[in-house]
Image: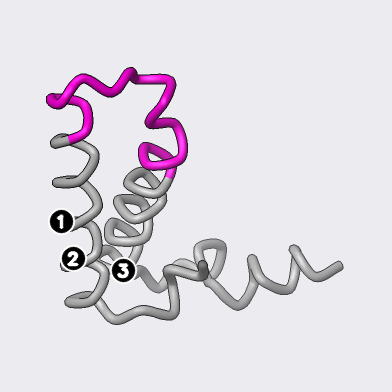
């Protein structure tokens, strides 16, 4: 999923929900390795939140620039 297309409130809500699910699973006895996909999702959401909250005027951090580079 392209997290950068979501608005800040939706990202926060999804992060909170996914992080709570991860925590509950780990406390419920799931192994760290079993939760690999869930950990990845929570990490990606945390990164997207950080980027969304700290948007800068730096062209090197521009989403458009990185998307163009990926499409080459």
Q: Position of residue 56 (x, y in %)?
A: 35, 68
For the record, the magenta segment spans 25-40
Q: Residue furthest right?
A: 72
Q: Position of residue 2 (x, y in %)?
A: 51, 70
Distance in Å between CA atoms under marks 3 and 1:
16 Å
Q: What residue sits right under mark 2 in the picture?
A: 12
Q: For numbered disc 3, what is the local secondary structure?
A: helix
Q: Position of residue 18 (x, y in %)?
A: 24, 52
Crowding at label 1, few (<14), some or many (≥20) Cα neighbours within 10 Å? some
In the image, residue 60 lies in the stretch drawn in magenta: no
Q: Main secondary structure of the magenta part?
A: helix
Crowding at label 3, few (<14), some or many (≥20) Cα neighbours within 10 Å? some
Front tag of 1 and 2:
1
In the image, residue 32 lies in the stretch drawn in magenta: yes
Q: Are marks 3 and 1 in contact (CB under 8 Å)?
A: no
Task: Say whether residue 71 is left or right of residue 8.
Answer: right
Q: For numbered disc 2, what is the local secondary structure?
A: helix
Task: Say whether residue 1 is left or right of residue 68.
Answer: left
Q: What residue sits right under mark 3 in the picture?
A: 52
Q: What residue sits right under mark 1 in the picture?
A: 16
């Amino acid at each position: 999923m392209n997290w950068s297309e979501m608005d800040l409130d939706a990202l926060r809500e999804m992060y909170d929900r996914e992080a709570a699910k991860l925590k509950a699973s780990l406390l419920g006895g799931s192994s760290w390795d079993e939760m690999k996909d869930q950990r990845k999702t929570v990490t990606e959401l945390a990164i997207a939140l950080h980027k969304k909250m700290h948007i800068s005027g730096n062209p090197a951090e521009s989403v458009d620039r990185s998307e163009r580079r990926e499409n080459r």
